């Protein structure tokens, strides 16, 4: 992966970013990257469920906002 946070953030926000890349970025150490992943419509629902448990409120709020637009309740919990 790229070591430049700004590049990773741009990739995380990009609607054309492949789902597997978004899944990898969801584990980034930087909150801004995880927040961008949570806001990307291409992020898999399972990844949003994982981000819903993020330690940062900013990320959790982004997931909650997406949850209002996506039915996360239908995702099976493992």
Image (cartoon, rainbow, N blue to C red):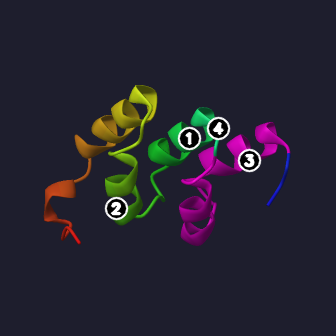
Residue under pointer 2: 45
Q: Secondary structure at mark 3?
A: helix
| Place of residue 15 in the rendered image (x, y in percent of width and height, measured from the top left) | 58, 53
Q: Which of the two discs, 2 and 1, labels the residue nearer the N terminus?
A: 1
Question: Disc 3, disc 4: CB below 8 Å?
Answer: yes
| Place of residue 1 in the rendered image (x, y in percent of width and height, measured from the top left) | 79, 61
Kindly report the distance in space between the C-alpha atoms of the residues bearing marks 3 and 4.
Answer: 10 Å
Kindly report the distance in space between the C-alpha atoms of the residues bearing marks 2 and 1.
Answer: 14 Å
Name of the residue lying farthest toward the left? 73
| Mark number, residue 8 | 3
Location of residue 55 by image quarter: top left
Question: Disc 3, disc 2: CB below 8 Å?
Answer: no
Residue 71 appears in the rendering: no
Kindly report the distance in space between the C-alpha atoms of the residues bearing marks 4 and 2.
Answer: 21 Å
| Place of residue 44 in the rendered image (x, y in percent of width and height, measured from the top left) | 41, 64
Residue under pointer 1: 36
Classify 76 as above or below 51. Answer: below
Position of 60 with respect to 27 (left or right) is left
Question: Disc 2, disc 1: CB below 8 Å?
Answer: no
| Mark number, residue 16 | none
Classify 6 as above or below 8. Answer: above
Of 42 and 21, which appears nearest the observer?
21
Q: Secondary structure at mark 1?
A: helix
Location of residue 68 by image quarter: top left
| Mark number, residue 30 | 4
Which residues are drawn in magenta?
4-28
């Amino acid at each position: 992966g790229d070591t430049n946070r700004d590049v990773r953030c741009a990739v995380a926000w990009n609607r054309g970013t492949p789902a597997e890349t978004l899944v990898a970025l969801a584990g980034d150490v930087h909150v801004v990257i995880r927040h961008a992943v949570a806001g990307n419509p291409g992020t898999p629902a399972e990844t949003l469920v994982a981000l819903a448990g993020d330690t940062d409120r900013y990320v959790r709020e982004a997931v909650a906002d997406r949850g209002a637009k996506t039915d996360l309740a239908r995702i099976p919990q493992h």
